[in-house]
Amino acid sequence: MRQLIRLAAAVALLLLLAVPALAQGQLIIRDPGGRLDRNAVERAARPLVNRGAAVAVYLVEDGGSNDFTERLVDDGLMRSDGAMRTNAIAIYVALNQRYSEISYGDDWNAALEVNDNAEYIRTTALNPGLSAGDFTRGVTTALGAIEESIKNPPQPGGGTNIDPTPIVVGVGGLAALGAGGYALARRRRAAKARGAAQQRLKDAREEAAALITALGQRFNAAAEKAKFDRVSYPPAEVERLSQLQRAASDRFVAAQLRFKETAEQLERREKPANEQLLQAAATYETIVAEAREIGEDLAVVERLRTELDEQARQAREEVERAKKA
């Protein structure tokens, strides 16, 4: 009995020790222009991360709702059907479009959905700093307001628990664009389109890679057989085999090069647009079709060798029969 008690106590202690690790979230900062004080943002986000939130901050030059959706999907904070990860909290700002948005998962509905509190935080905590050009202040104030709302959730119909900050939005201020139903529906459509483009690219690339790999093995085998052509077949047939195999090999090398160039073009783009993904997918699909044709060309060479081998076997048998006769 004492051993059972000690075992139960040890298990309970392990579970208690595991809770902080399980509660840890993550922080993603996408700031290509380097306008944010990352240390300040990390400090402001730490209470949310410690709660298990997956926090993302995006401050980009150009974008909008569709770009926000694509980034959320790419970073694993949104599924391709438009559903946010339940523990996600994301702040997005596109400077040239004067666009800001706050999005979140179901874990934070009590804090951010009631009374449209996320929109209130966007306009009273995030936008004032953005409008003044103090992007770090805007983001950190918004993160602090979100944390405060989680600690003290707003009451339905009872306003918010955040002190409003006066907004002074001049000509250079951010437009007051929200994350309402229309934006959500648009994000979901954009997410589905992004997911479809990524899936088409993945399928086409994998099929092309598999065909090229298989062709490479067949060409290696053909090259080994070609070493014995001159001692196995008549000169005219050797030349015929050589021409057919060389033509197929040249097409194969060109297909390999196109495959490599397509991959390199995608790698050079930090964030390819859907059109670029689809264009690359179409190129891979063309390579798939060409690889199949090359396979047929190589099959002609393989069948010709088989036929010549059979003719040589029959000729040897005829000679053997003649000797025995």
Image: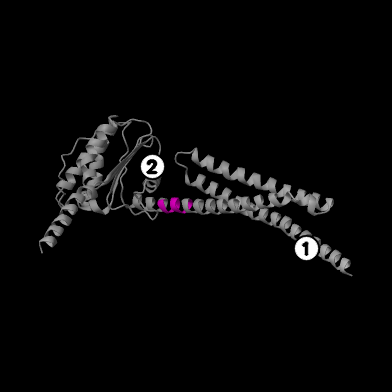
Q: Which residues are magenta?
A: 191-197
Question: Disc count in the image?
Answer: 2
Image vertical order of residue 164 relative to residue 16, above or below? above
- Three-letter code, disc 2: Gly
Secondary structure type for disc 1: helix
Instruction: Provide residue 43's location: percent of width, then percent of height.
Output: 23, 36
Q: Which residue appears farthest toward the bottom when viewing the image? A: 325
Quarter of the image with the C terminus is bottom right
- The 10 Å Cα crowd at callout 2, few under 14, some 14 to 19, many 20 or more, is many
Q: Is the stretch drawn in magenta largely helix, strand or loop?
A: helix
Side of 320 relative to 122 (left or right): right
- Three-letter code, disc 1: Glu
Tell me if residue 99 is in the magenta stretch.
no
Quarter of the image with the N terminus is bottom left
Instruction: Provide residue 237's location: percent of width, then percent of height.
Output: 81, 53
Mark 1 = which residue?
Answer: 310
Q: Quadrant of residue 316?
A: bottom right
For the question of whether residue 116 can be seen, the reply is no
The residue at the point 55 percent across, 54 percent down is: 207
Q: Which residue appears farthest toward the front when viewing the image? A: 324
Cα distance between the residues tagged 2 and 1: 68 Å
In the image shown, does 239 or 38 lie closer to the viewer? Answer: 239
In the image shown, does 125 or 84 lie closer to the viewer? Answer: 84
Mark 2 = which residue?
Answer: 64
Image vertical order of residue 57 relative to residue 221, above or below? above
In the image shown, does 307 or 104 lie closer to the viewer? Answer: 307
The residue at the point 13 percent across, 61 percent down is: 3
Q: Quadrant of residue 296?
A: bottom right
- The 10 Å Cα crowd at callout 1, few under 14, some 14 to 19, many 20 or more, is few
Q: First in sequence: mark 2 or mark 1?
A: 2
